[in-house]
Structure formats: structure tokens, C-alpha cells
Image (tube, rainbow, N blue to C red):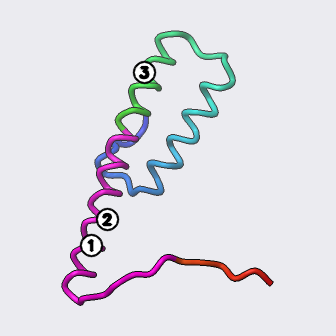
Amino acid sequence: MAKKSENLSFEQSLTELETIVAHLEQGEVSLDDALKQFERGITLVRQSQTKLEQAQQKVSILLSENDVELTPFSVESE
């Protein structure tokens, strides 16, 4: 059975989500199993979004504490 999503890293959650999507795309899943997997996927997405928001907040705090100003990244054409 899958690990609890609270204990997964962002990368582990993403990997599990990719597995769920691939399994559902095959179309050989019973309706009950598909619903369970969909529910698991929603949980993983929500928790991953929270982790991303927390990381963004940390970066914002670090930048504001050090008076760092970011400039947009651009790639020069050759």
C-alpha cells in the first residue's frame, strides 16, 4: 500500500502522482479503484501545493531579510 502522503517529499509525491495518472490512463481500472486512486491523487496534489507554498514563503522571507532584489531571468540568443 502507498505511504502516507504527509511523510513523502515533494519529489516522492510527484512520482506517485505520475504512477497514478499512468495507471488511470490505461483504462483497465475498476470504477471503485479509479475513485480511490483519484482521491489519493487529490490528497497528494493538495499536500504538494502546500509544500510549494511553504518553500515560496521561505524564499520570500530570506530575500526580504537580506534586501535581495531578483531580476527576471533571460536567455540571450546567440
| Residue topped by disc 3 | 36
Relative image position of residue 60 (x, y in whole percent):
27, 73
**Mark 3 crowd level (few <14, some 14–19, many ≥20, 10 Å Cα):** few
Could you classify mark 2 by the number of other residues whose Cα lies within 10 Å: few (under 14), some (14-19), or many (20 or more)? few
Seen at 44% across and 81% down, the residue is 71
Secondary structure at numbered mark 3: helix
- Seen from the viewer's position, the closer of residues 61 and 11 is 61
Does the magenta run of residues contain 56? yes
Residue 47 appears at what percent x and percent y? 32, 45
Disc 1 target residue: 60
The quadrant of the rendering that contains the C terminus is bottom right
Q: Do labels 3 and 2 touch, CB within 8 Å?
A: no
Q: Magenta stretch?
A: 44-72
For the residue pair 43 and 70, the one nearer the viewer reads as 70
Residue at figure coordinates x 65%, y 26% from the top left: 25
Q: Where does label 2 land, which residue?
A: 56
Give how far apart the Cα atoms at labels 2 and 1 are: 6 Å
Q: Quadrant of the N terminus?
A: top left
Q: For residue 5, which quarter of the picture? A: top left
Of the residues shown, which amino acid type is indicated by label 1? Ser
**Quarter of the image holding residue 54?**
bottom left
Q: Amino acid at mark 3?
A: Lys
Q: Are marks 2 and 1 in contact (CB under 8 Å)?
A: yes
In the image, residue 61 sits, relative to residue 15, either above or below, namely below
CA gap, disc 3 and disc 1: 36 Å
